[in-house]
């Protein structure tokens, strides 16, 4: 049975139903619904051929070509779908909910699947994604200079049941010139937005949501403007951690990274550091003096953070000293602080 269904209704279903995306691998890689399985009707090259035929010859010829290209694939599609959805309940979509998803739905229905055909396809989903950024969230921003342990604190807050959106985790980047950590690969901008929207959808809008203070861009990814503006308007807790504690933490984190990567990343901020400080920083990296390297680059990053903080509404900025190095204790201190501080 084929059941046409609106995307919003499918996402709200009580029972989780696997979703297959029948667009090409290239389309899927560029952006897809989180959790969806790619079961492409056409390869990237085949899709180009069908599209060209549609434009240059006509719709009927394109349909015939499509069946020629997929003729030997249908049994494979069914077998793959059975692995994904052994109970024979499955969702299907393409770009606009047109011929590709319709053909796949027809075949799976013929085999005995209960098929939920997403109306409007991925195009409709992208409209839904942008609507999530327009919602009003009770954001609580966690700020603090580089090395203050904000990411660890967010993870601890999540562990104790708080709602947390970790933008750096979603963007696969830690926000600085060194943010890729020489291993993380950023998703496309579109996929970053999809992943963020998926997490926002799961939030209770009546409860606080913790987010780390970020620039508009995280690496090469941009925070969607409506959500970014909410972040800038929200109250921020500016945590204060001793300089030496920050230096020690960063030296331990970056000390195991490849020296060439650290030097290349330092060169990228040469104009901001200045030629002399850049030279000293690179010498420290080469000689393994990680704490000296960290102290040099922190001058720039601390100045950048203070500049950003100065542009916020001062009435919404509150400071909190965190002397204890234990993350669980720090997180508990922050939670008690929010309860006892009317300004936030």
Image (spheres, rainbow, N blue to C red):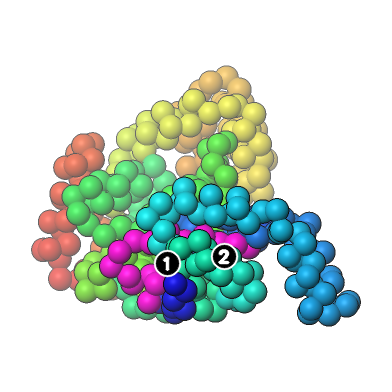
Q: Nearer the viewer, residue 63 or 211?
A: 63
Q: Are marks 1 and 2 in contact (CB under 8 Å)?
A: no
Give the answer, above or below, for where 297 lies relative to 196: above
In the shown orientation, is residue 229 left or right of residue 188? left
Q: Is residue 133 visible?
A: no
Residue at the (58%, 27%) spot, across then down: 258
Q: Quadrant of residue 246?
A: top left
Q: Position of residue 4 (x, y in %)?
A: 47, 78
Q: Which residues are magenta?
A: 9-23
Q: Nearer the viewer, residue 97 or 3?
A: 3
Membership of 219 in magenta stretch: no
Q: CA distance from mark 1 to mark 2?
A: 11 Å
Residue picked out by circle 2: 107
Q: Main secondary structure of the magenta part?
A: loop
Membership of 12 in magenta stretch: yes
In the shown orientation, is residue 196 left or right of residue 138? right
Residue picked out by circle 1: 114
Q: Quadrant of residue 13?
A: bottom left
Q: Earlier in the sequence, mark 1 or mark 2?
A: 2
Q: Position of residue 286 (x, y in %)?
A: 61, 22
Q: Residue furthest right?
A: 56
Give the number of marks: 2
Residue at the (66%, 40%) spot, across then down: 267
Q: Secondary structure at mark 2?
A: helix
Q: Position of residue 170 (x, y in %)?
A: 46, 54
**Label 2: how many Cα within 10 Å (few below 14, some 14–19, many 20+):** some
Residue at the (42%, 46%) spot, across then down: 146
């Amino acid at each position: 049975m084929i059941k046409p269904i609106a995307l919003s209704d499918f996402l709200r279903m009580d029972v989780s139903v696997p979703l297959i995306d029948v667009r090409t691998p290239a389309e899927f890689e560029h952006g897809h619904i989180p959790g969806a399985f790619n079961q492409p009707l056409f390869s990237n090259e085949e899709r180009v051929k069908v599209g060209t035929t549609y434009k240059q010859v006509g719709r009927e010829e394109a349909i015939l070509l499509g069946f020629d290209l997929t003729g030997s694939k249908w049994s494979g599609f069914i077998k793959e779908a059975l692995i994904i959805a052994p109970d024979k309940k499955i969702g299907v979509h393409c770009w606009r909910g047109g011929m590709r998803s319709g053909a796949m739905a027809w075949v799976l229905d013929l085999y005995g699947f209960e098929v939920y055909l997403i109306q409007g396809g991925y195009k409709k989903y992208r409209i839904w994604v942008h609507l999530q950024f327009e919602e009003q969230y009770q954001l609580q921003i966690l700020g603090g200079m580089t090395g203050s342990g904000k990411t660890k604190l967010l993870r601890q807050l999540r562990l104790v049941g708080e709602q947390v959106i970790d933008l750096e985790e979603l963007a696969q980047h830690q926000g600085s010139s060194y943010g890729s950590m020489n291993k993380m690969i950023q998703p496309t901008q579109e996929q970053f937005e999809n992943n963020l929207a998926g997490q926002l959808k799961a939030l209770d809008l009546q409860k606080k949501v913790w987010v780390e203070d970020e620039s508009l861009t995280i690496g090469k990814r941009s925070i969607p403007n409506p959500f970014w503006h909410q972040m800038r308007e929200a109250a921020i807790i500016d945590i204060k951690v001793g300089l030496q504690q920050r230096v020690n933490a960063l030296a331990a984190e970056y000390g195991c990274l490849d020296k060439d990567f650290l030097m290349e990343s330092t060169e990228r901020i040469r104009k901001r550091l200045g030629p002399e400080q850049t030279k000293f920083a690179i010498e420290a990296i080469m000689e393994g003096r990680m704490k000296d390297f960290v102290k040099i680059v922190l001058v720039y990053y601390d100045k950048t953070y203070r500049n950003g903080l100065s542009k916020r509404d001062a009435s919404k900025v509150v400071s909190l000293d965190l002397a204890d190095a234990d993350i669980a204790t720090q997180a508990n201190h922050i939670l008690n602080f929010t309860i006892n501080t009317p300004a936030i």
